[in-house]
Each structure stands twice: as C-alpha cells, then as structure tokens.
Amino acid sequence: MKKPSNAFVMASWLALGAGMTGFLIGLWNSNMQLNEKGYYFTILMYGLFAAVSVQKCVRDRLEGIPVTDIYYGISWVSMLLTIVLLTIGLFNATLLPSEKGFYAFAFLLSVFGAITVQKNTRDAQASKNADTGKTEF
C-alpha cells in the first residue's frame, strides 16, 4: 500500500477547507433568518458525515471488511437525503440564482474534500501498518 502524496493530501484538505469556509461565510453574511442558517448548516454537517460513511462502507466492502447491509444502506440514503434536502431548500429559497449556485457548489466541494481526506487518512494508516507489519486499521 502506497502512502498518498503530500500534494494530494494538501489538495484534499484545501478542498474541504475551501468548501466549508465558503459555505459557512456565505451563511454568516446572508440575510437569512437564524432557522434557515441552521437548516443549511445542519445539511452541510450531515452531508459531510454521510459522505465519509459512504466512502468508508464502500472501501470496507472492497477490502473484505464486514459492513452490515443496514449501515451501508443508511449511509447511502443519508448522502442522497442531504442532496435532496439541499436541492429542495435552495429551490424554495428567496436567494439570487448565483447565491443558490454558490451554496450548491460549496456543498459539493466540501463533500468531495471530506471523501478525499478520509481516503487519504485511511491510505496513510494502511501504508503505516504495512510498514510495521500490522494488519488492522
């Protein structure tokens, strides 16, 4: 198992940071009511958790690590649910189309960053374990 390159690790963290920071600064500076801000914040956090769960389940199954069907299904449903909830929220929001697009792409960049950071963390740990002869994660 090869350790991910430092450039890829940094790019992954940068994508996660840029997406989250952009999304959160957008919320902070918006004229939305506090409950709307909470809705979008919760979708972002739930989406990041769901994305990491999906990536972990898929990777575990590829590596022969047991994953229950219920957890695998819940992870996928959660990821799809966050996308649907964000889409419905933005569709019904009284925002400019450019603002709606900003939130959508900041969310997608954050999810991509979370997935790649989790992948890199796991690959680095697997590489470290391979170097020391350990077989567990």
Image: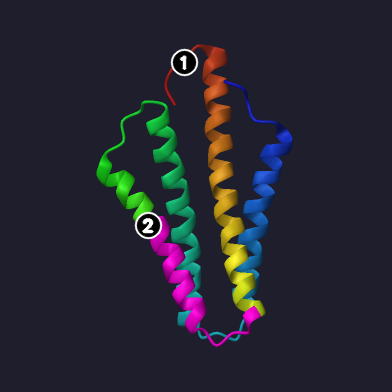
Q: Which residues are magenta?
A: 79-97
Residue 78 x/y as whole percent:
37, 57
Which of the two marks, 2 or 1, is nearer to us in this view? 2
Disc 2 and disc 1: Cα gap in Å?
33 Å
Q: Nearer the viewer, residue 119 or 28?
A: 119
Residue 64 x/y as whole percent:
36, 26
For disc 2, the neighbor class at 10 Å (few under 14, some 14 to 19, many from 20) is some
Q: How is the image coloured?
A: rainbow
- Quarter of the image where one finds residue 121: top right
For disc 1, the neighbor class at 10 Å (few under 14, some 14 to 19, many from 20) is few
Query: Relative to 64, does residue 130 appear above or below in the rendering?
Result: above
Q: Which residue is farthest right? A: 7
Q: Main secondary structure of the magenta part?
A: helix
Q: Amino acid at mark 2?
A: Ser
Pointer 1 residue: 134
Q: Helix, strand, or loop for circle 2? A: helix
Pointer 2 residue: 78
Q: Helix, strand, or loop for circle 1? A: loop
- Asked whether residue 51 is in view, the answer is yes
Residue at 54% across, 46% down: 115
Is label 2 in contact with label 1 (beta carbons under 8 Å)?
Answer: no
Q: Is residue 94 magenta?
A: yes
Residue 47 x/y as whole percent:
46, 58
Residue at 61% across, 67% down: 23
Q: Is residue 118 magenta?
A: no
Q: Amino acid at mark 1?
A: Lys
Left or right: residue 115 versus residue 4 is left
